[in-house]
Every structure is written in C-alpha cells, then in structure tokens.
Amino acid sequence: QVKLVESGGGSVQAGGSLELSCTLSAYLDWRACMGWFRQAPGTEREGVAVLSRDGYNIYITDSVKGRFTIARDDTKNLVYLQMNILKPEDTAMYYCAAGGPADCSGGVESREYAYWGQGTQVTVSS
C-alpha cells in the first residue's frame, strides 16, 4: 500500500511563506503526475499545482501563479510546494497526490490520481 505524508503546514501572517513537502512510502513511476490540491471548508477540492517528470509539463492554477512553485525529486519520492506571498484566501487543507495521468494530462482539472495524502492545514491570517 502506497502512503503519502504531507508536512510543512501551519499558521502564518499574510505575505508570509511556507514550504509543503510530501513523502511517498514507495517508488512510483517517474512519468506519473504528482501535485497538490486544496480544499477550504464548504468548498470543492481544487487543483493547485501539478507536474510531470523533470518538469516537462507543469500546470498551476491562475490564483497562485507567480506566488507558488512546485518541484519534485523522483530519486527521493518527494514533491514540494513553495508558497510565497500567502493570502487569507489560500487558507485550506492541502493534499498531496501521486500516480496521476502521464505527463499530467488534463492539468489541474484532472482528479485521476491513485494516491492521496491525509492533508496538512495552511492558515493565513490578515
């Protein structure tokens, strides 16, 4: 059974930064898409940023472009989300996902991921 564990969440002031990390318990196909999704209370889960092997395909939702950066280290089964200039509207539970479509087909709109983490809370105050 593949397990994903997120870390790095917390509470910060608006304008601050956080880096989320996701560790996978097993080695997965490097060609498979990995990424981050988020869900605020009372809302649908939305895609934040996803990427394929070596950053060949990267998709980032418009609301965080220029502020968030996604990266992966396939040799260590890790995926990161660097979040800068955080805003209150970024407050949500952030979920790591792996085993997605090859080359991240479908971008952030796709939810075809085989594995999901339990989430890490990010809270941004004004």
Image (cartoon, rainbow, N blue to C red):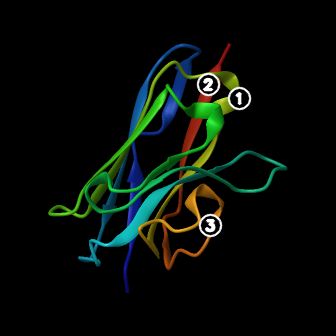
- Asked if residue 126 is positioned above or below residue 49 in the image, the reply reads above
- Asked if residue 40 is positioned above or below residue 98 in the image, the reply reads above
At horizontal 56% and vertical 59% (from top left) the residue drawn is 107
Residue 41, given in percent of the width and then of the height, sits at 78, 47
Name the quadrant of the N terminus: bottom left
Along the viewing direction, whichever of 8 and 69 lies nearer the viewer: 69
Residue 110, given in percent of the width and then of the height, sits at 62, 67
Q: Which residue is mark 3?
A: 110
Along the viewing direction, whichever of 64 and 41 lies nearer the viewer: 64
- Asked if residue 88 is positioned above or below residue 52 in the image, the reply reads above
Along the viewing direction, whichever of 84 and 53 lies nearer the viewer: 53
Kindly state the secondary structure of the residue where label 2 is placed: strand
Q: Amino acid at mark 3?
A: Ser
The quadrant where residue 82 appears: top left
Kindly state the secondary structure of the residue where label 3 is placed: loop
Neighbor class of circle 3 (other Cα within 10 Å; few <14, some 14-19, many 20+) is: some
Name the quadrant of the C terminus: top right
Instruction: Report how far apart the C-alphas of labels 2 and 1 lie in the structure.
Output: 8 Å
Q: Are marks 2 and 1 in contact (CB under 8 Å)?
A: yes
- Asked if residue 31 is positioned above or below residue 68 in the image, the reply reads below
Q: Pick whichever of labels 2 and 1 is earlier in the sequence.
A: 1
Instruction: Report how far apart the C-alphas of labels 3 and 1 lie in the structure.
Output: 22 Å
Along the viewing direction, whichever of 21 and 65 lies nearer the viewer: 65
Q: Which residue is mark 1?
A: 89
Q: Pick whichever of labels 2 and 3 is earlier in the sequence.
A: 3
Mark linked to residue 124: 2
